[in-house]
Image (cartoon, rainbow, N blue to C red):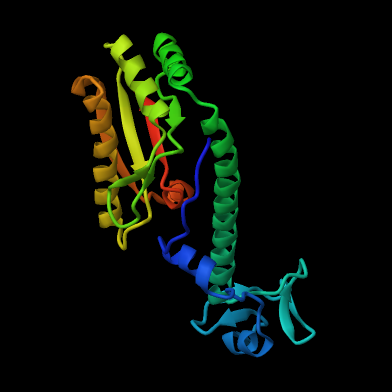
């Protein structure tokens, strides 16, 4: 899927740590580990809540650390949480890198789009009843502080409008993602305003309102990269 990365923003606590925190260190500290666990009279390893972490024979003290039979250092809950955060941060970084790489491809592809080629693409989607197909509008850019459009490729909009007029029974939904606002509620609102604006552009070109719906996706956790990229997509509904 083609995406364009406009800017990286603070959109969830994990992303905050990704971009502005030097690192969430998860290496187990020897002294802290030994304070977190103790061996009871039966030889079991317990935590400070007196819960058995490892039974006798399932662990040993080696090099100053409690380790399990697989040679893995036994971690406190906070260490496990840090590992989980680091893994999520790494995954998010990968998504952002992929979004950036895809945006470069998007520029090349978008440059070759013409009104007729976009129209032909949508005609094919409508004729083959390709319901659920997502068509990215990578050239639409918004003011980060509002829903106003700062740039778009008219061939995309005009070609799509022409195809919709040629196929009056077809329907699409404009979906816009964003992480520009300071809260999830604000992200949903501004993304809906942006989606409405794109929809109104098509209506102004003669497309029936009955053929278009608009949805503000905001900043969904599962599509964080799209929100960072301020993605604008058209989904074929009929």
In percent of the image, x 37 and y 50: which residue is there? 178
The one of 86 and 93 positioned closer to us in this rendering:
93
Residue 238 seen in render = no
Residue closest to the eye, 83 or 191: 191
Outermost residue, right direction? 63
Residue at the spot 43% in from the left edge and 21% down from the top edge: 115
Left or right for 187, reference 137: left
Q: Nearer the viewer, residue 130 or 27?
A: 130
As displayed, is residue 32 above or below residue 23?
A: below
* Above-or-below relation of 187 to 53: above
- Say which quarter of the image contains residue 46: bottom right
Location of residue 154 in the rendering, given as x and y in whole percent from the top left corner: 38, 30
Towards the viewer: 154 or 67 = 154
For the question of whether residue 154 can be seen, the reply is: yes
Q: Please tell me how many numbered marks the rendered image carries.
A: 0
In the rendered image, the quadrant that contains the C terminus is: top left
Location of residue 186 by image quarter:
bottom left
Give the percent coordinates (x, y) of residue 214. Answer: 26, 34
- In the rendered image, residue 93, in percent from the top left (x then y), is placed at 57, 57
Residue 193's x, y, as percent?
24, 44
Question: For the point 52% across and 77% down, which residue is it?
Answer: 51
Q: Residue at x 56, y 31 (%)?
A: 109
Q: Is residue 191 left or right of residue 88?
A: left
């Amino acid at each position: 899927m083609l995406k364009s990365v406009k800017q990286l923003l603070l959109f969830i606590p994990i992303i905050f740590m990704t971009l502005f925190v030097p690192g969430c260190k998860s290496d187990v500290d020897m002294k802290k580990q030994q304070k977190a666990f103790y061996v009871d009279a039966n030889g079991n390893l317990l935590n400070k809540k007196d819960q058995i972490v490892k039974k006798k024979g399932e662990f040993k003290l080696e090099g100053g650390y409690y380790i399990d039979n697989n040679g893995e250092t036994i971690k406190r809950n906070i260490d496990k949480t840090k590992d989980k955060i680091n893994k999520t941060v790494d995954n998010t970084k990968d998504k952002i890198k992929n979004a950036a790489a895809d945006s470069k491809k998007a520029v090349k592809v978008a440059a070759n789009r013409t009104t007729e080629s976009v129209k032909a693409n949508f005609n094919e989607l409508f004729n083959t009843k390709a319901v659920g197909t997502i068509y990215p509008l990578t050239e639409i850019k918004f003011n980060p502080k509002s829903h106003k459009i700062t740039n778009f490729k008219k061939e995309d909009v005009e070609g799509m409008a022409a195809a919709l007029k040629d196929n009056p029974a077809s329907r699409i939904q404009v979906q816009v993602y964003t992480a520009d606002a300071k809260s999830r509620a604000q992200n949903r609102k501004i993304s809906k305003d942006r989606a409405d604006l794109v929809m109104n552009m098509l209506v102004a070109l003669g497309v029936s309102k009955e053929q278009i719906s608009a949805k503000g996706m905001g900043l969904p956790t599962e599509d964080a990269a799209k929100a960072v990229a301020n993605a604008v997509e058209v989904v074929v509904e009929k």
